[in-house]
Amino acid sequence: MKYVRSLVRDVPDFPQRGILFRDITPILAEPRAFHITLDAVAERFIGEHVDAIVAVESRGFIFGGALAARLNASFVPVRKPGKLPAATDRVAYSLEYGKGELEMHRDALSSGARVVVVDDLLATGGTASASGELVRKQGGNLIAYAFVIELEGLGGRSRLAPVPVVSLIQYA
């Protein structure tokens, strides 16, 4: 993971002043790094029987779709309001620099489906927690959260407890 971590780009003052954004696009630009990242996450779930990967718009889609293919699981997108064409469930949440709402198709999961929520980065855990709430609302069994990057100082992991959290790269 040292190689993959070396590709994460720091972008100061994005999306607003005072935020240090950890940019994963250089990982995506390097096929070897992208494969290493996907394989490292997938390895954690081999033998776990994952039915669905629920991924958060938009960078979570990049990892979630590829991970779903590797684990032979369905891919379920979680999006901002008004972006999904059929009936949806919706939750409101707060994140490190604002508030938001997320939606997921009402028929996305079957009751008891074993689900992993995937995103590129864990900060305060608001977005991931809201996605987990959507999974539970549909009767899914949330078995883990998975992230490429975790910003440990923002407390996201504790907000997601007791559900296990997998993160590949941590920043204090």
Image (cartoon, grey):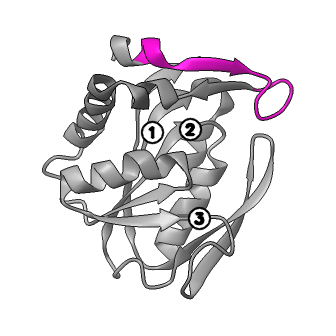
Query: Separation of disc 3 and disc 1 at Cα?
Result: 17 Å
Marks 2 and 1: CB-CB under 8 Å? yes
| Residue at 58% from the left image edge and 82% from the top image edge | 88
Query: Separation of disc 2 and disc 3 at Cα?
Result: 17 Å
Nearer-N-terminus badge (2/1): 2
Nearer-N-terminus badge (2/3): 3
- 96 vs 128, left or right, is right
Marks 3 and 1: CB-CB under 8 Å? no
Where is residue 77? Give x, y as percent: 47, 65
User: Which type of secondary structure does the marked residue at label 1 adopt?
Assistant: strand
Mark 3 closeness class: few <14, some 14–19, many ≥20 residues within 10 Å: many
Residue behind mark 3: 79
| Residue at 16% from the left image edge and 46% from the top image edge | 46
The mark closer to the camera, 2 or 3, is: 3
Q: Please tell me which residue lies in front, 40 or 138.
A: 40
Where is residue 119? Give x, y as percent: 49, 46
Considering every residue shown, the one lying at the far right of the view is 17
Give the image quarter of residue 11: top right
Q: Which mark is residue 122?
A: 2
Label 3 is placed on what type of residue? Arg
User: Which type of secondary structure does the marked residue at label 2 adopt?
Assistant: strand
Residue behind mark 1: 147
User: Which type of secondary structure does the marked residue at label 3 adopt?
Assistant: loop
Nearer-N-terminus badge (3/1): 3
Q: Please tell me which residue lies in front, 159 or 38.
A: 38
- Rendered view: 150 above or below 139: above
**Magenta segment range?**
5-19
Label 1 is placed on what type of residue? Phe
